[in-house]
Image: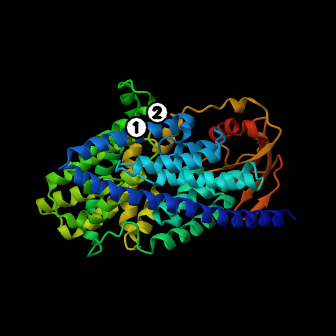
Amino acid sequence: MKILVADNDKLKLTLGGIIVGLLSGLVVSAFRWSIAKLLVVFQGVYTAARSNYLIVVSLVILLAAVGIFISILLKSEPNISGSGIPQVEAQLSGEMKLNWWPILWKKFVGGIMGIGPGLFLGREGPSIQLGAAVGQGFSEMTHENGAFQRVLIASGAAGGLAAAFNAPIAGAMFILEEVYHNFSPLVWVTALASAVSSNMVALYVFGLRPVLDVPYKFSMPVKYYWHLLLLGIVLGLLGRLYQVVLLSMPKIYSKTRIPRNLQGIVPLILIIPVGMLYPMFIGGGNGIIINLPKLGIGLTMLVGLFVLRFVFSMISYGSGLPGGIFLPILNLGAIIGAIYAVFMHDLGFLPLAFESNLIIFAMAGYFACIGKAPFTAIILVTEMVGSLKHLMPLAVISLIAYLVVDLLNGAPIYESLKERLNIDNSFLNKASKFNDRLEISVFEGSPIEGKYIRDIPFPKDILIIAIYRGESQIIPRGDTVIKAGDRLVTMVNASKRAKIKRILEELIN
């Protein structure tokens, strides 16, 4: 009977995931389409402003007004600030309660108005939060709560990323690797169902062409793989620099004495001269990535482009405007790959024909080390470029870059951003009338591996109701031995879930 219930739960959540995915696909596709169209309009206006001071004055007034409008949205709902991924992580871990409807429409409107003028922000973070809000809204309408609600929120987030990048597998993987940090069957099946259905909507709207259709001529021979080691080290060092600078931006902005919700006016005004000088280089950066091999620009220009993109990405995201860092990170990685390829070509160590290859590889490596999510990086770039030929070099460079940042004590960027959220968790001190499900995975080398349950100092406020070992379900007893790979299913008071999760993670890991 227990297996039947579990199967019914999976089927119910899978169907729910499909519906959430379809809804997320519609919302995110509209969001993505609006940003792309608005960016084209602003690029034309910036170009026209070069010879018309009246347009420049009008732009200053317009974008200042946009900044004030977004500041009103931020003041009324601070949780639409930034990418939204840290907020989703905090929500799924039980540390934060969010109201889905205000976040849905305010993030949608604020994201379009903040990203559309050409700021160096990505659509993917907001897309993940929009999808999560859709999942939460659906779960509340269907009266789901606890674990089922969280799974639907996570599936919506996966659908949001899938629709933003036409990358359904990466959407599901990101939720598992970056948010949940384990492969719970309830989560991955529902997330995959949502991601696939959401991607179907995006494919219908935007077509089958890969988001980053980077042209390349040849697969990289093994004799040049030593370049992957060097480039991986460079990416790791620059990735750690990215983490440090990004996390210090709120402190830098505080020195301006501009109220936090009004700081978005700064990048919105600064984008005007940038857009007038380099209209082709503004925005999230996917157009730059696609055209980078065709530009034929020299090393100095590439370095200048990297500095411009790096500095203004920090200014854009650090202001707190609704917008992400996902795509800007990939863009910076692509530019680093191009710089390395041109530099090594000038030294006579690498044919320039492999520039496109290194652009593709460096995107994965840079995201892998900054987000510390190498599997997501590999799959994401594979899906975005539409080719499976790069899996081995993608894995090599992602691993090297990841290890470099790890040696430099770099933490996952979204986890670090989550820790800096101003979270009101006063609700955690109030006992709930509901119990909630909490799953914890036992990894290889865990301190409790090989121990009897009765000998493990579990918190008194939990009840272990099941142990999943592969596809088998074990009813726990005092003499049950814990093994690596087990998933412990516990019941806790809903208000204490986040606190007990931290205690169990410290105990088990």
Q: Residue at x 76, y 53 (%)?
A: 144
- Mark 2, secondary structure of its residue: helix
> Residue reaching furthest front?
54
* Residue 317 in which image quadrant: top left
Q: Nearer the viewer, residue 237 or 313?
A: 313
Q: Nearer the viewer, residue 97 or 412?
A: 97
> Residue reaching furthest right?
1
Q: Which residue is mark 2?
A: 261
Q: Which residue is mark 1?
A: 264
Q: Residues within 10 Å of mark 1 (few under 14, many from 20)?
A: many
Q: Is residue 173 visible?
A: no
Examine the rendered structure and indicate whether residue 318 appears above or below residue 133: above
The colour style of the image is rainbow
- In percent of width and height, residue 26 lies at 56, 63
> Residue reaching furthest left?
347
Q: Quadrant of the C terminus?
A: top right
Q: Are marks 1 and 2 in contact (CB under 8 Å)?
A: yes
Residue kind at label 2, given as amino acid type: Asn
Q: Quadrant of the N terminus?
A: bottom right
Residue kind at label 1, given as amino acid type: Gly
The reply, left or right, for residue 280 in relation to residue 127 is left
- In percent of width and height, residue 50 lies at 19, 49
Which mark is drawn over residue 400?
none
